[in-house]
Structures are given as structure tokens and as C-alpha cells.
């Protein structure tokens, strides 16, 4: 479990899931907005093959604002139509 | 807006705005809930006088507020970097 105030390296290696329980990938790095003094996005690698158009990309930058929670894993908001399986379920 | 990968900051040298070498970055403290960057965790250089700085073992904490710019070096404001949070 990660405390509120934490070292940024503690995030690295955490698994990223959406709030519908779909695996996205693994946190590899964080992008910092130097002027805003905030985390701008997280760089996710080891991407799930379920993600559409992940072909040819090694990673994905996920904006920090869609992160719901960080604990033993990172939970992000579900992105409609980003995943193969979820989009077929809905349609 | 200047953005940077946190891994590219690792081991970057920290310089104060009066030209004194402070040390090198070891880690970054963040607030997970808000995404706010709080402190730089810096391993001070042997020649650097750490008096007045917030210490954590042999490392010092420099509030991110003190950061002026990040290019080849991380430049921090000499007075703001000593401010206690």
C-alpha cells in the first residue's frame, strides 16, 4: 500500500487497471509538469494486447486526471472503446 | 509548459541560483491524491553546507517550489529551498 506522500519511484512497476477491472499495463515512468509542479501523466508500458491500436507503440501516456486511485495497483477511469473486449460487450 | 520524464531527473545535478553545486537528485516526493510534486530528495555534494535544510538521514529535502528551471541542471532558489514546509 502506498501512502499519500510517497516517493515517485514507488509507483514504478505497479500494475494499471481500469475501474472495470481490465488490465492496461505497468507504470514505467511519470511525466512531471515543471511549471505546474504536478504529475502530468504516467507512462505505462508492457501494454495489454487488449488495448486497441497498441500495435507499434511501446507505451502509453495516461493523463493523471483519469487516475482514480493508487494503492497496490493503479486504477484509472475506463476509456470507452479503447479495449477490444469491452467495446464488443457494449455494442 | 515544460514537462519532463521523472526518470530523466534521476541523478541530475542540483545547482542553486547563486551558482553553488548542491548535489544530485535521488528521488522525488509526490502527493498521490493530488498529483502535486512536493520535494526533491537530494544527496548533497561533499562540499555543500547543508545547515538550515530539511534533512532526511544523509539526504536533504528541497521543496519543489524552489525549482526555477530544469535543463542540464536543476536550478533551485537559494532561499526558497531552505524554507521549512
Image: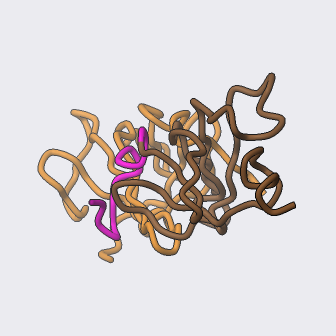
Chain colours: A brown, B orange
Residue range in magenta is A1-13
Q: What's the residue at 47%, 34% (across, down)?
A: B12
Query: Which image quadrant for residue A34?
Result: bottom right
Would residue A78 appear left or right of B65 to someone viewing this image? Answer: right
- Image quadrant occupied by the N terminus of chain A: bottom left
The reply to whether residue A38 is in sight is no
Q: What's the residue at 47%, 56% (across, down)?
A: A74
Residue A6 is a magenta residue = yes
The x, y position of residue A37, in whole percent, is: 58, 64
Would residue A81 appear left or right of A12 to someone viewing this image? Answer: right
Between A3 and B66, which is closer to the camera in this rendering? A3
What is the tally of numbered marks visible in this picture? 0
Looking at the image, residue A5 lies above or below residue A84: below
- Image quadrant occupied by the C terminus of chain A: bottom right
Q: What's the residue at 24%, 35% (across, down)?
A: B47
Would residue B64 appear left or right of A89 to someone viewing this image? Answer: left
Query: Which image quadrant for residue B78?
Result: bottom left
The x, y position of residue A53, in whole percent, is: 83, 35
Between A15 and A8, which is closer to the camera in this rendering? A15
Amino acid at each position: 500500500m502506498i501512502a499519500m506522500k510517497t516517493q515517485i519511484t514507488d509507483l514504478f512497476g505497479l500494475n494499471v487497471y481500469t475501474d472495470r477491472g481490465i488490465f492496461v499495463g505497468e507504470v514505467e515512468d511519470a511525466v512531471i509538469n515543471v511549471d505546474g509542479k504536478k504529475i502530468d501523466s504516467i507512462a505505462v508500458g508492457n501494454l495489454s494486447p487488449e488495448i486497441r491500436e497498441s500495435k507499434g507503440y511501446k507505451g502509453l501516456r495516461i493523463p493523471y486526471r483519469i487516475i482514480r486511485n493508487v494503492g497496490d495497483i493503479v486504477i484509472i477511469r475506463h476509456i470507452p472503446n479503447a479495449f477490444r473486449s469491452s467495446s464488443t460487450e457494449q455494442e | 509548459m515544460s514537462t519532463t520524464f521523472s526518470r530523466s531527473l534521476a541523478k541530475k545535478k542540483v545547482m542553486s541560483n547563486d551558482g553553488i553545486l548542491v548535489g544530485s537528485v535521488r528521488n522525488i516526493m509526490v502527493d498521490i491524491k493530488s498529483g502535486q510534486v512536493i520535494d526533491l530528495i537530494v544527496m548533497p555534494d561533499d562540499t555543500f553546507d547543508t545547515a538550515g535544510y530539511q534533512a532526511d538521514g544523509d539526504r536533504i529535502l528541497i521543496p519543489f517550489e524552489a525549482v526555477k528551471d530544469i535543463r542540464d541542471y536543476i536550478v533551485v532558489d537559494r532561499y526558497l529551498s531552505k524554507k521549512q514546509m
